[in-house]
Amino acid sequence: MQIPSQAAVSGVVAVVALMASDLVGSDSLAGIGNAGATLGAAATAVPLAAMMRRRGRRPALVTAFGIGAIGATVAAIGGEIGSLTLFVTGMLLFGAGQAGALQSRYAAADLAPPDMKASAIASVVWIGTLGAVFGPLLTPVEKNLAESFGISRLVGPFAAAAVLFAVSGVIAAIRLRPDPLVVSGGTNLEGPKVRLAVQVRVAWQAIGESRLAKAGLAAMVVSQATMVAVMTMTPPHMKDHGHADLSALVVAVHIVGMYGFSPLVGRLTDSYGRLRSLEIGAIILVVGIFSTVVAGYVPGLMFVGLLLLGIGWSVGLIAGTTLVSESVRPSMKVEVQGTADLSMSLCGGLAAFGSGFIKEEWGFHILADISAVAAATLLVVVWLTRITTRPDLSLTPR
């Protein structure tokens, strides 16, 4: 389930800015495709969590991947016929599959013991590494295959993503048995339906009651926004300097950083503490982003910077997710998870959308500088939370 869905997401990420740039005719709206996907993921996050609460993880994930497959198909058609409207509509639907890939990480923690929750979440993130890495690496093959059928080369990865999301849905339907959320007693099959707006408000109240949950959410949001902003504009930035052919490889290395180190990140989070791990992650984000700023015309430094950016994101996601999930009342866990993903995806979508304008008007280095400042601010927030919160299981080694 994780491997094909992550291959779908990462394969599209490697080309979505280039497709949008071609459709618009400039880099000012190059981030609109990625923004559409992340905003689609944001819009799906809370309804997906509500469906999980009532029916379990399996039916919700099958639905999400199915919508994602439809979205990838619509985006491919939009790209082929030159319709920006159809392309963006498809990317919004594509975001549902991205939300499914994200929320599947919570399934690992449903039955995990308290001292292994971060490692369990990390294991799901890690298992998607193969798909996440091979997605961009397969894009040249998918482009050539599309060309052999007489369609635009950039359409190939979108068509492949539709197939991969469909495969993920089939795997979830067949293999996610028994449903971990049902087994853990996390569903409420006979409970009254609650309006999504009410669900989000109540979840926000639950997060607001815990300083630790707020720090975890801040880590998820800032890590996602900075990563998306810099990563989205990396292919157009490299294209500007004559390194377009290397951009897919840079994205692949970036994704190795995002997923390949997750088992180590999970162990770090469980043994060293949630907040201390987030401090380390914020520092890695700053260093990675700074490397992209000083890279200039040296492609090698882009590899280093994007690798570190991916690792920093991994720490923020895993440690932040664990902290948010365990710092709220158990009865609110699923709703808070959906709202946290909503916030993370929404801010990521805004970052992706704005990144093109910033690059076009002021340059890639200003975009990276803004992202570095945001990561540095996160470091201060987490540090203040750690020194002002009494020691507990989220702060101290286990």
Image (cartoon, rainbow, N blue to C red):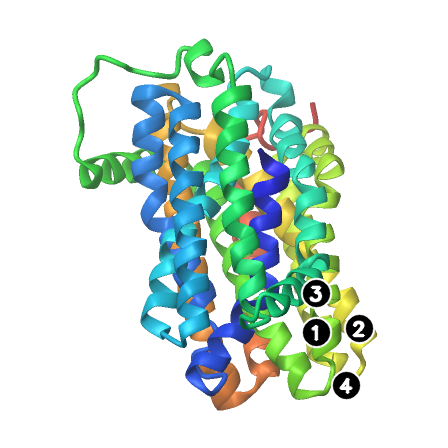
Q: Could you tell which of marks 3 and 2 lies nearer the N-terminus? A: 3
> Along the line of sight, which residue is nearer the eye, 354 or 161?
161
Amino acid of disc 4: Tyr
Q: Which residue is mark 4?
A: 297
Q: Could you tell which of marks 2 and 1 lies nearer the N-terminus? A: 1
- Is residue 374 visible in this depiction of the protein? no
- Element at label 2: helix
Amino acid of disc 2: Leu
Residue at (67, 55) in percent of width and height:
310
Residue at (37, 23) in percent of width and height:
329
Q: Which residue is mark 2?
A: 301
Q: Position of residue 238 (x, y in %)?
A: 68, 80
- Element at label 4: loop
Q: Are marks 2 and 1 in contact (CB under 8 Å)?
A: yes
Q: CA distance from mark 4 to mark 3?
A: 24 Å
Label number found at residue 140: 3
Q: CA distance from mark 2 to mark 1?
A: 7 Å
